Amino acid sequence: MKTLKIIFRCIAFVILTLLISCEKFEDKPKSCNLVWSQTFGDSDYDKVESVQQTTDGGYILAGWTTSYGAGNYDAWLIKTNAEGNEQWSRTFGDSDYDVAESVQQTTDGGYILAGWTNSYGAGSHDAWLIKTDATGIEQWSQTFGSSNEEMVKSVQQTTDGGYILAGWINSYEDYNAWLIKTNAEGNEQWSRTFGGSNWDKVKSVQQTMDGGYILAGYTDSYGTGNYDAWLIKTNVDGVEQWSQTFGGSNWDEIKSVQQTMDGGYILAGYTNSYGAGNYDFWLIKTNPKGIEQWSQTFGDTNHNMAESVQQTTDGNYILAGWTNLYGNNYDGWLIKVER
């Protein structure tokens, strides 16, 4: 399926690195120390899409598995200790395709998962929200969508105890960015769409300091050409306040966004318009209005894609993604950037 971009051809490979020391940012990281790594899965396709450190110092991982569960692709939740050793895992789904794309620990110590399902809901590819307790036991789930294709790529608990979800919705073979706000039980309070007559998708959402939301992804309806990176700011009710595009004549996309300490935003994804060639890691810093302050690419003529970015406590940035910089296969790539 085109929505399942199988990066690793064997088992899910997760590198959870705790101590990284990288020198000045260049096209390749230098002096980086791997503390430990763990693998999860069996003989079929298993993939992790999202990871977060938990309050006990361990990690929660979410993705999908074909090795375990009810059949086909099942949503997969794994809890580890601080050394990445599995403590428990859970699957969710039925006999069709069911995938978790994002996970976050909730204020009650449980977990919220978001993705999409073909086993439940109104039709093919419905957006899917699952709430579990602290041991991964399902407490409730909700689906959102119609007979068309809908998908959620990012979820975050909001300050009112509800949830904000971002992804896209298919309408008459075009895709529009989709933002959904729910209450604490996962019941929809409102939803908004963004975009034009072409393909427009968002991959990341975060609640901002003013109570609104920042969304990031790509657009084919706006910008300079082909697919451009896309940043949208809304108020607390999901009404657009402004948007910005970034990119050139080729394919450029943002996969992760975070508000920074100065009120601006840090964006990470990939670009085919700039850099060394093919797809390069792409890091963009903006001011609070989404105006670019600087950008940086990392990579060579092979494929390199950043999937996640965070500002670190020292005010710098950590990027994670994958690369075939060092061979024919894809490897996880972690870069620390000092600005």
Image (cartoon, rainbow, N blue to C red):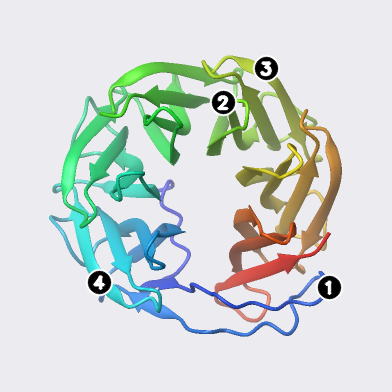
In the image, is residue 152 above or below residue 309?
A: above
Q: What x and y, as percent, mark residue 193? A: 51, 19
Upstream in sequence: badge 3 or badge 2: 2
Marks 1,3: beta carbons within 8 A = no
Upstream in sequence: badge 1 or badge 3: 1
Which mark, by number, is residue 211? 2
For image coordinates 58% across by 14% down, the residue present is 239
Instruction: Give the distance between the C-alpha atoms of the residues marked 4 and 1, in whole angstroms.
Output: 37 Å
Q: Which is more foreground, mark 3 or mark 4?
A: 4
Q: Which is more foreground, mark 2 or mark 4?
A: 2
Residue on which the image places disc 1? 24
Upstream in sequence: badge 1 or badge 2: 1
Residue on which the image places disc 3? 241
Looking at the rendered structure, the kind of residue marked 3 is Gln
Instruction: Give the distance between the C-alpha atoms of the residues marked 2 and 4, in whole angstroms.
Output: 35 Å
Q: What x and y, as percent, mark residue 236? A: 54, 19
Instruction: Give the distance between the C-alpha atoms of the residues marked 1 and 2, in whole angstroms.
Output: 35 Å
Residue on which the image places disc 4? 87
Disc 4 residue crowd, few under 14, some 14–19, many 20+, Cα 10 Å: few
In front of the other: 226 or 68: 68
In the image, is residue 331 above or below residue 201?
A: below
Q: Secondary structure at mark 1?
A: loop
